[in-house]
Amino acid sequence: MKIRHTSILALLTIVFANCSSEPEMQTALINGKITVADSVDSSKDYSGIQLLITHREDVDSEVDTLFLEQSNRLGNITGKVEFPFQGIYPVYISRNGNVIGSTQFILADNDTINFSGELPGLSENFEVDSRENRAMEVYNRVDKGFRRVLAYINAGAVADTLIEDELRKWSDLFWEVYENYPGTFASNMAGGESVRLLNTFDQNLMMQRINDALPSDEMIGVAAKYGFEYKAETQGVEGAVSYLDSLQDLTKNPKIKRALDQERIAFYFDSARVDIAKDLLAEFEKEYDDDPKAQQWAKTIGYDLSYLAPGYRVPEFSFETDEGEIIAPDSLVGKPYILEITPVASRLYQNQYDRTVVIHQIYQNYDLEVFTIPLDKSEVTVQAFFDERVKHWSVAKFGGFDVQKLIETFNVTQVPTRILIDQQGNIVRKYVAEDFTDVIQGLNTIIKQNQKGS
């Protein structure tokens, strides 16, 4: 039994990001001192050392300067920093125009960050103290212990009969951090991690902890992930959507409301209720007509709804394999298959590769085929990847397909992108990035359909 350890950080922050409306800025106090060792500068003049805190909304945005102050003769740096939301922000320290150190500060409203350090050697002697930092140190200690135990579990060094007890213990330890340091960034992370672990073996307690944490905005993201999945499994589509509605009623945060609207549309889409998803998307586009990022998201999912929805005929495509075979939809009718469109250099693809091998080995008994279409710019990269592994399925020949046309046809905006197609050549589902964990459901649907038809 292997347990995945994934960071809850993205889950907690995604609902606070990518909103075009101006957030209400939060503030914290910065108070610290950076000196210089006598062996480097005996003048005792520590002025001119700059501390810079930045923020970047996403990879396409420009970097914003939140705080830029320089030290006085004593090395003191003080001031007030304004920032859009509680979280982790990059910090750069420079002198004479050269960056000499970098770190991170956890910024939270009304907190005070005290720090000290000496040049050279900031990487070893830089110290930070704040309410948020103290909470994070506790979280890190618990997380480090859990990672160590997790390694033992994944190595098979813990008996299967003891795994649940171990996971429960660490879930309880994370929950203690959540309760003991309320409102901190570490508390939010710990609460999410506690819930994630419970999702693997005790969903009743998981739901109890989610409910205990609500209506906290910070925990709504966790509820929308794990509570929503639980409701979908136990109460079906309508129960799951009703749960999303209840979460939306708990918050006034427009960013969270928008994220839940997006989740609702995507859920109907994945559930093959395309007409409902299209109607909701039309409402979404009207409501967020002044939000460029929301419109871009709508454009992306709108294409999928029009051409790549479950039950739709797979669009025309073709590519040549390394063996010289030309693959196209007509040649594959009669068997289910997965198209993988990705750079093989993608870390996520590589992490998922062993799982894909297992899936292929199990479902090839049902004639499942897998085709990998690598988007890497170097043929050497592709060859090196498969030279290190047994090639279990066909791979598109480098230069054996029109890259741009393929990306446009299957609306590839994230990688890996995979499309599962049934025996009749109809799309079962498109899986983007981590969505591939749900592929077993789609494959079982194909098998059931085949059994009914036989």
Image (cartoon, grey):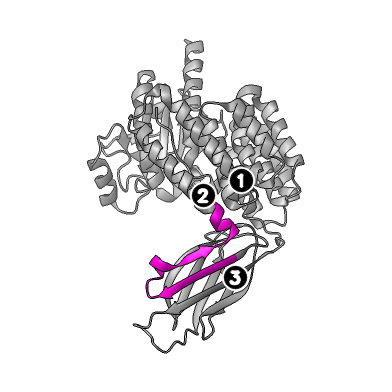
| 92 to 442, vertically: above or below | below
Residue displayed at 45% across by 23% down:
423
Question: Which residue is the site of mark 1?
Answer: 180
Type of amino acid at the residue the image marks with label 2: Val
Q: Secondary structure at mark 1?
A: helix
Image quadrant of residue 63?
A: bottom right
Q: CA distance from mark 3 to mark 1?
A: 25 Å
Q: Is residue 123 magenta?
A: yes
Q: Position of residue 115 (x, y in %)?
A: 52, 68
On the picture, is 343 further left or further right than 206?
Answer: left
Residue displayed at 47% across by 42% down:
6
Tag 1 and tag 2, C-beta contact below 8 Å: yes
Question: Which residue is the site of mark 3?
Answer: 30
Q: Is residue 10 magenta?
A: no
Question: Which residue is the site of mark 2?
Answer: 138
Mark 1 or mark 3, which is nearer the start of the sequence?
Answer: 3
Mark 2 or mark 3, which is nearer the start of the sequence?
Answer: 3
Which class describes the residues within 10 Å of circle 3: few (<14), some (14-19), or many (20+)?
Answer: some
Q: Secondary structure at mark 2?
A: helix
Q: CA distance from mark 3 to mark 2?
A: 22 Å
Q: Position of residue 138 (x, y in %)?
A: 51, 49
| 117 to 334, vertically: above or below | below
Q: Secondary structure at mark 3?
A: strand
Which class describes the residues within 10 Å of circle 2: few (<14), some (14-19), or many (20+)?
Answer: some
Q: Residue furthest bottom?
A: 43
